[in-house]
């Protein structure tokens, strides 16, 4: 059975023939999103030394590679798109970082309970999987006290976006109430998931997470609008957050 997101990411993968994944794997610094804001400024992650990490929607896994280089003991990348995992495996071989990979959707991960200290998603499950299914999976996979860190488009930029790859405007383009499943008119059938902040808070708390931070990313003063990420201009993102990072800690009830 084909899945529209797997189809979209198989096509996207075929377009990256310019060594982009290798270039990202070669970098050491952890940065976030389209404005490349460094972890040293945002402090979104816990200490990684010795941590077991699962990345949900790992794609080509450059983000997981950075976490391994920063001291994580084990990084397991989960993604449903075979072509993306093939690129990730090729890079892993080349850079010898010893990541592990599992082909699966973030909504249903064939890995054991209580197996990880940190679950991350950098534009993976965080926008491409149904949050009402992947957040419970993240909670199941984490050990008590483990953390969940995910990067997504801000709710505000989604509200202000006329269409996929059309720059966000300064007026609201859609209702916030009822946000959940999105298919952009020009999105080729791919399905994204976006929630309001209130719904994120309720969902995280219902799954045992304490919210530690919500980091709203501001484009730096010298940032320029990307050709590839045309959905927001640098000027817009200097005034309003176009991306956000949620950080939460799991408190598993004692049985
Ligand atoms: C932007 S890429 C992630 C980038 C990644 N952080 C990296 O380091 O390369 C988005 C990924 O989400 C994956 N994806 C799509 N649907 C998904 C789902 N339901 N659960 C988890 N991942 C999904 C796609 O296959 C794609 O590889």
Image (cartoon, helix red, strand yellow):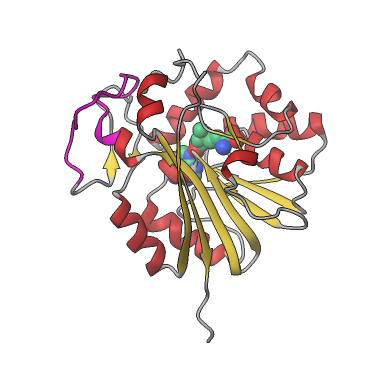
Residue 30 picture quarter: top right
Query: Which residue is most to the front?
Result: 221
Q: Residue at x 74, y 33 (%)?
A: 28
Q: Which residues are magenta?
A: 158-176
Up the image or down, 5 lies above or below 17; here it is below
Task: Give the percent coordinates (x, y) of residue 200.
Answer: 35, 55
Which residue is nearer to you in this view: 177 or 114?
177
Q: Is residue 57 left or right of residue 158?
A: right
Q: Is residue 157 left or right of residue 150?
A: left
Q: Residue at x 32, y 41 (%)?
A: 155
Q: Answer whether residue 236 is magenta in the image.
A: no
Is residue 158 visible in this depiction of the protein?
Answer: yes
Q: Where does the N terminus fall, quadrant-wise?
A: top left
Q: Is residue 167 left or right of residue 38?
A: left
Q: Main secondary structure of the magenta part?
A: loop
Q: Answer whether residue 168 is magenta in the image.
A: yes
Q: Is residue 186 left or right of residue 248?
A: left
Q: Residue at x 72, y 28 (%)?
A: 27
Up the image or down, 74 lies above or below 91; here it is below
Q: Residue at x 59, y 69 (%)?
A: 145
Query: Which residue is most to the right?
Result: 96
Which residue is nearer to you in this view: 217 or 101?
217
Is residue 113 visible in this depiction of the protein?
Answer: no
Task: Give the percent coordinates (x, y) of residue 117.
Answer: 65, 62
């Amino acid at each position: 059975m084909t899945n529209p997101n797997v189809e979209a990411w198989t096509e996207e993968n075929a377009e990256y023939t310019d060594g982009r994944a290798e270039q990202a794997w070669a970098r050491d610094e952890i940065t976030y999103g389209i404005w490349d804001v460094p972890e040293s400024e945002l402090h979104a992650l816990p200490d990684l030394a010795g941590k077991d990490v699962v990345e949900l929607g790992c794609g080509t896994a450059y983000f997981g590679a950075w976490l391994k280089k920063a001291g994580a003991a084990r990084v397991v990348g989960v993604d449903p798109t075979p072509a993306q995992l093939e690129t990730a495996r090729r890079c892993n071989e080349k850079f010898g970082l010893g990541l592990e990979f599992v082909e699966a959707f973030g909504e249903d991960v064939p890995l054991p309970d209580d197996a990880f200290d940190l679950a991350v998603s950098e534009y993976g499950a965080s926008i491409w999987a149904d949050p009402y299914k992947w957040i419970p999976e993240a909670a199941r996979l984490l050990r008590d006290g483990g953390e969940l860190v995910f990067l997504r488009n801000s709710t505000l930029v989604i509200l202000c976006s006329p269409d996929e790859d059309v720059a966000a405007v300064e007026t609201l383009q859609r209702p916030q109430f009822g946000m959940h499943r999105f298919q952009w008119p020009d999105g080729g059938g791919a399905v994204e998931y976006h929630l309001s902040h209130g719904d994120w808070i309720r969902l995280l708390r219902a799954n045992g997470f304490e919210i530690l931070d919500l980091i709203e990313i501001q484009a730096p003063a010298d940032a320029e609008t990307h050709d590839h990420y045309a959905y927001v201009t640098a000027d817009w993102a200097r005034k309003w957050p176009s991306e956000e990072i949620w950080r939460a800690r799991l408190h598993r009830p004692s049985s």
